[in-house]
Amino acid sequence: MKFSYNWIREFVENLDYTAGPLEKLLTMKTAECEGIASVGELLASARTARIESVEAIAGSHNVVAVVDAGPLGRKTVVCGAPNCRPGLISAYAPIGKKIIHGVESDGMLASGAELGVNRDHSGIVELGVAGEEPPVGSPIPGCQPDSIIEIDNKSITHRPDLWGHHGMAREVSAIIGLKLKDPARLDLLPTGPAVVRIQIEDFDLCPRYSALVFDNVTVRPSPLWLQYRLVAIGLNPINNIVDMTNYIMAELSQPMHAFDGGLLQGDTIFIRPARPGEPFRALNDEHYTLDSNHLVIADADGAIALGGVIGGGDSAISDGSNGHTTTRIVLESANFQASSIRKTSTALKLRTDASMRFEKAQDPANTVRGLARAIELLREISPGIRLVGGLADSKRELPPPPAIDLPLDWLQRKLGRNIPPSEVREILDRLQFGVAEHRHGVLSVTVPSWRATKDVGIKDDLVEEVGRMIGYDSITPEAPLVAAVVPPPNLVRRFQHEVRSIFIDQGFTEVYNYSFISEAAARAFGFDPAAHIRVTNPIASDQELMRASLLPGIWKNITENAKHREQFRLFEIGLEIHKSPKGLPNEIPHLVAALYSRHGDGAAGLFEVKRATECLMPGALAEPASPRPFEHPARAANLQWKGYTVGRLFELHPRLVESGRAAVVDLDLRLIQELSAGDVKYTPIRRYPSSAFDLSVVVGLREYAGKIQAAIASAAGPLLESVSFLRQYSGPPLEEGEKSVSFRVTLGSPERTLSSEEIGEIRARIIGSIQKFDWGTRE
């Protein structure tokens, strides 16, 4: 947001701060300033001058002009502007002498763009019209060098009053303690019946709508001072009527709009929700199809403006260039519901200077102030203009905001500094709050209308007002006198930290994904999008569902990283979010880890992922299971631990991975944490040596090694320490369709060294048990 220093200075009497110190003051007490830019430097020395004669330069489009610059004397200037002609009063800038086409040019005749007063490069500036020419040799009327203070929009988003120069000047006057001038003269508002009627359908959407009608309007370029003011703060001059509305918006933070009264149908302006499918052509010449969520300003034929956002092209002001000349205008000044304007602007992707201000919750009292200011400006920039009828003003009377009790001892505790009650009252008075003291030590503060729109509403807001005015740097920093208490342990977070450390130690890299997925990603895994929670206002088109599984996110990580790496390990800890029949959704913490390799058949990856999982859950077993749609048809298993199914081990289906193999484990961390909560028993180191023997079991090719291992463990008895898989073999001398699976069986006793007879007995018992399954052994 850009603010003109000269403009602010007009409203603050006897302001002696220059732009630099003022910027620092505003940053410390009101809003963050981002810098100062100088504009119109050439205006300091430029003077009005009359062109006395013009002589062409042979072989060039330039001319030699002799100009009368008043006290600066007569100057000979080389000029290339097509409108350079005798008798024209323009702007002369004494920038020094220069030889152009063999002619010495003393200074220059300047265009509006070169002066910085507008963006017109087409010719030199033409000052005044017949009978209104400024004196020769005088400064350019109403134009002088200026400093533009740029303020960060985010720091004033809660202050709609600061989106105009008068509001910022109000802050300056309060900070420095100077008198504030009011540019709006309410005594100019006409009395009597209005010639236009206003009908508001919903006062919640439009609390107030005011309008005036003017006849004998002249549409022409604005005077240079007005163009200069707008260009300096980043607005484009268009014509005197439109520029006037933009000027008031920048001055009073009140957006306004002028309709061509000759193009309106009927004598009533309707403020209503748009009809479904209602067409609308905006001033930007874009066509929009509206719905009932959009508020429109309409005449008898249909929408003539999109309320609070943009005017309509069918009722635009015209200077005659399109065959129609505006001579009668209806000038509106309205107040709209902030959230409605924001939703409309966002839905139509149409953000304007007006909508940005209405989104901040404007002051309803400002509508007539804007119209009063417009009367004064229009009389200056459109001579002969005439008001028709009185003020049309439809509104819902709003109750005044309740007074806020401000205990002075509470205020001082909050700020951490003693402040005399008289200083508190003075600060609030300067900020134009109403202050009374109905009880000793408690101020009753009433909030002005421009601060009561979602800005100041509770006593804590008043603390901020006093604090910023006394300066937070005047408060001595002190540590709070609050006992330091160790927060209660967060067992879930601690457990997840442990899980995270385990997988990082196993070489996995943690990733973080959004908690949102697309419908396409859900369908890729066979999930029903209807079973997911849908996001009402998604941050992106591909993030409309809350994830019920971490797998789509990990899959995306795999496909992206596989483009650049031949192998990698990833894991994520996050929440699965599931619908609940009532109340809040059910959020279940999960871990999904993946190991990708571009080479090999994938078997090693599955075993490696299972090994990493066993670091978290010692003794976990993988039981073969029917594959789900996104799993490899022959590589899917449930993970069992302590009698519960705690997760899933599988390889992603080849259709989901273009090249290579991806082994995945999906674990329910909430269940695993519950199962991990039991007491841990101490087992002393064995005092006696263990004994081991290898056993090779001959089974069918499709037999699971886990089933063989479980049978061996069951038959071994209480002296068994462990059963470890060694190797698997198929081929001669085994029969076709057979394989040999070898295990190492380790036995031991805490009380003695086992004898060879005991070991042999256990081995025989295991072999006998194996034979009951029609399995054989191999020496």
Image (tube, rainbow, N blue to C red):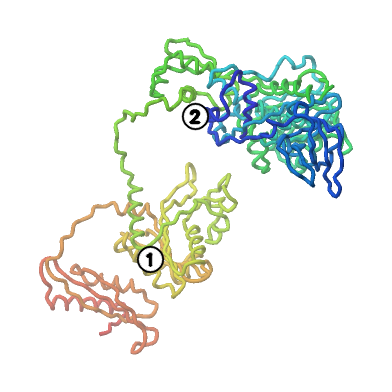
Residue depicted at 47% across the width and 55% down the height: 549
Q: Which mark is residue 28?
A: 2
Reading the image, the residue beneath label 1 is 609
Where residue 304 appears, as percent x and y from the top left, is 78, 34
Q: CA distance from mark 1 to mark 2?
A: 57 Å
Quarter assignment of residue 185: top right
| Amino acid residing under circle 2 | Met
* Secondary structure category for the residue under label 2: helix
Sequence-first disc among 1 and 2: 2
| Amino acid residing under circle 1 | Val
Quarter assignment of residue 41: top right
Q: How many marks?
A: 2
Relative height, residue 247 to residue 554 (above, below): above
Q: Say which of 766 and 41 sits in front.
A: 41
Q: Between tags 1 and 2, which lies in front?
A: 2
Q: Is residue 555 visible?
A: yes
| Image quarter hosting the C terminus | bottom left
Relative height, residue 181 to residue 126 (above, below): above
Q: Say which of 205 and 164 sits in front.
A: 164
Query: Counting other residues with Cα less than 10 Å from the Cα at mark 2, is it few (<14), some (14-19), or many (20 or more)?
Result: some
